Image: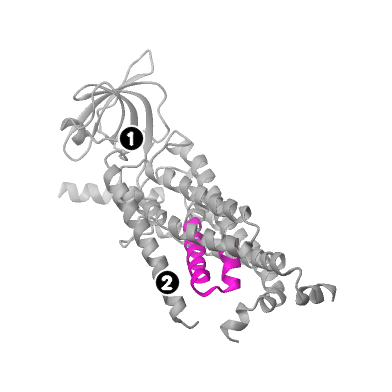
Amino acid sequence: MKITETNKKRMIKIFVFFFAISSFSALLIYAFSKNMVYFYTPSQIVKQEAPINSFIRIGGMVKVNSFQKSKDSLKVTFKIYDLNEEINVNYEGILPDLFAEGQGVVMTGKLINKNTFVANEVLAKHDENYMPPEVADMMKERKGDSNNK
Amino acid sequence: MNISKIANLKFFFTNTKNLSRFLGLFTFILFFFGIYWGLYVAPSDYLQGESYRIMYLHVPAAWLSLQVYMFMAITGFVSLVWKVKIMEIISIQCAPIGAYFTLIALVTGMVWGKPTWGTYWVWDARLTSELILLFLYIGVIALYSAFSDKRQAVKITSLLAIVGLVNIPIIHYSVEWWNTLHQGPSVTKFEQPSMHISMLLPLLYMFLVFNVYFIAVLIKRVQLGIYNREKRSKWMEDYLSD
């Protein structure tokens, strides 16, 4: 295909058009990116970036050995954490199959104070790792070995 | 064989019949082996058990939904700049195929989401931007059918396709830019894939199968597009009456 003067003009027009559209959307996304956060992390909540007593979502990892279940109801409590901070969670209801200590969760609910969250929906978030069970066991063992040394 | 010959509508229409038939049959055979590999041979996942196997439909469909869109925008660009008839037809015929791939990705994602996350749908950035992609495809199809002058229509839909190209990096990077319920990329990143090789190989194979399927269906649809545009021309009447 030859590039004539007419072709060049058309190309430039389209490029300018596309450049305008993409800068427009880049600015738009940049301006709204704070509102596009799907959930808050425990660190953000401790820094009081999330409003108290209004419906929000928070996400984090369930702390190992923090899960407690009530004997005569569906009430559960556990802690979630991210890199630095921890939040207490109260929830009453059915948990998804993938819910487990050490796994990720995303919850909808209200903060009743700056480190207690009352959830009315708990969703499990899994990571991008896929492997057969035997490989997962092997990796766990290896990790255990390096911790013992 | 040179480019201008393939770009000739008559040449394309009269010479690709056997090719599209062969590719259709070929897809069917490839797909059968891919499903067997993904559903029976590949090991189950340490965390999700068997339910992760829907990945073998979900992930290739989602990749193709992006790839077909880019192909539609690029051929649209070429048709805008050079006014090549065959490119106009290819560009617009990509839209329904891409829409189907997007729909498959969304529906299989919902079916997968219920047992793993605990919900069919959430409005996180990945799911929402993929839904917007479906609306873009539908927009292109609707816009095309709104014009009676089809050459004029392709000009407009090509522009819309180019505008919508902005959405493609947003879909891909949504899981990295924002907190989302959808997990990050396992394969399409520069580091080593976070997936065991025994699960990754059937996935890449299925991606290949979906690509063959795409080419087979595209050829078929382009033939249809050529027929619709040229049905009153002399060569088409001669060809069909033979």
Disc 1, SS: strand
Q: Which residue type does callout 2 highlight?
A: Met
Task: Indicate whether B105 appears above or below B113.
Answer: below
Q: Residues within 10 Å of mark 2 (few under 14, many from 20)?
A: some
* Observer able to see residue B50: no
Magenta segment main secondary structure: helix
* Residue B185 x, y percent position in the rendering: 36, 53
Who is closer to the viewer here, B42 or A114?
Answer: A114
- Residue underneath mark 1: A105
What is the chain identity of the residue bearing mark 2?
A
Disc 2, SS: helix
Report the Cα–Cα distance between label 2 and label 1: 48 Å
Q: Which residues are magenta?
A: B65-92
Task: Indicate whether A35 appears above or below B169.
Answer: above
Q: Which mark is residue A11?
A: 2
Quarter that holds the C terminus of chain B: bottom right
Name the outermost residue toward the bottom. Answer: B1
Query: Residue at 42% of width from left, 74% of height from top?
Result: A9
Q: Which residue type does callout 1 highlight?
A: Val
Magenta-colored stretch includes residue B174: no
